[in-house]
Image (cartoon, coloured by chain):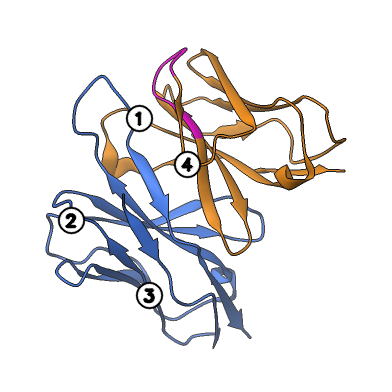
């Protein structure tokens, strides 16, 4: 069964902390994505990557960075967590050049910043 | 930029009824893909159905079918014989394929979602 795994289901962090959200996929997909999901706002793209060490900004990259050192792993970094980054974070992956595939999603990490 | 609009924030129907969720989108592209995703309380986003814009025939997957109206830029989801397990958030999504190889990724643009509640 193909899988996208997010390391934490729930996370509570303090304001100002550096936070790492990890995502691993076992499908050898080239593309990986980080979204945040908020009620009434749907899913908004933070960053994506289509190759190792490649990254591109999505719609709301401010306050975030990413790292992709290996094909299977895509990390989202909150350099200095703030309360407005309290949200659900979803990781997804897809194969390059197969637009009809859509995405495979992880189960999400609910992050609370206090 | 593409936009996806789901005009129904929440819907509630009785079990076994048929329900239709609406979705409209705005694009100047001719070649694209449309998807419906389901997100149950477990939070796992699951692909329900996909439609390729160049195909006129509406996609169907068991109890799920779409009404794709390309000229009207409409992509509604019909759920027949609804079941309690259909209770979830449903997201409509649009994908424009990359224009060239070697750069970028095929990105999905999502609507804000419809919360569907199936009542026993």
Residue A82 sits above or below residue B2 on the image: above
Q: Give the CA separation, mark 3 to mark 1.
A: 28 Å
Tell which subunit mark 4 falls on.
Answer: A
Residue A48 sits above or below residue B39 on the image: above
How crowded pointer 1 is (Cα within 10 Å; few <14, some 14-19, many 20+) is rated as: many
Callout 2 and callout 4 share a chain: no
Q: Which residues are magenta?
A: A47-54
Q: Give the CA separation, mark 2 to mark 3.
A: 17 Å
Query: Helix, strand or loop at disc 1?
Result: loop
Which chain wears blue? Answer: B
Please give left or right for residue B9 compared with residue B60 in the image. Answer: right
Query: Helix, strand or loop at disc 4?
Result: loop
Kindly identify which residue carries mark 4.
Answer: A59
Residue B42 visible within the image: yes
Q: Nearer the viewer, mark 3 or mark 4?
A: 4
Kindly identify which residue carries mark 3.
Answer: B22
Pointer 1 with pointer 4, Cβ within 8 A:
no
Kindly identify which residue carries mark 1.
Answer: A95
- Please check the rendered image and state whether residue A51 is part of the magenta-colored stretch, yes or no: yes
Colour of the chain lettered A: orange
Work out whether mark 2 precedes mark 3 in sequence or the reverse, and give the earlier one.
Answer: 3
Kindly identify which residue carries mark 2.
Answer: B53
């Amino acid at each position: 069964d193909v899988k996208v795994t997010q390391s934490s289901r729930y996370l509570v962090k303090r304001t100002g902390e550096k936070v790492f959200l990890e995502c691993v996929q076992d499908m050898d997909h080239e593309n990986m994505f980080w979204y945040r999901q908020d009620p009434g706002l749907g899913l908004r793209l933070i960053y994506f990557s289509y190759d190792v060490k490649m990254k591109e900004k999505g719609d709301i990259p401010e306050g975030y960075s990413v790292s992709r050192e290996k094909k299977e792993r895509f990390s989202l970094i909150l350099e200095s967590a703030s309360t407005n980054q309290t949200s659900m974070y979803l990781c997804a992956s897809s194969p390059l050049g197969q637009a009809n595939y859509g995405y495979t999603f992880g189960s999400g990490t609910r992050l609370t910043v206090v | 930029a593409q936009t996806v609009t789901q005009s129904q924030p929440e819907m509630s129907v009785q079990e076994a009824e048929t329900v239709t969720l609406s979705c409209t989108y705005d694009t100047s592209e001719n070649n694209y893909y449309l998807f419906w995703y389901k997100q149950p309380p477990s939070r796992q986003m699951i692909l329900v159905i996909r439609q390729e814009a160049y195909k006129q025939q509406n996609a169907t997957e068991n109890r799920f079918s779409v009404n794709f109206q390309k000229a009207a830029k409409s992509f509604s989801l019909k759920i027949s014989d609804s079941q309690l397990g259909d209770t979830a958030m449903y997201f409509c999504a649009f994908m424009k394929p990359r224009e060239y190889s070697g750069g970028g990724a095929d990105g999905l643009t999502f609507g804000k979602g419809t919360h569907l509640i199936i009542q026993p």
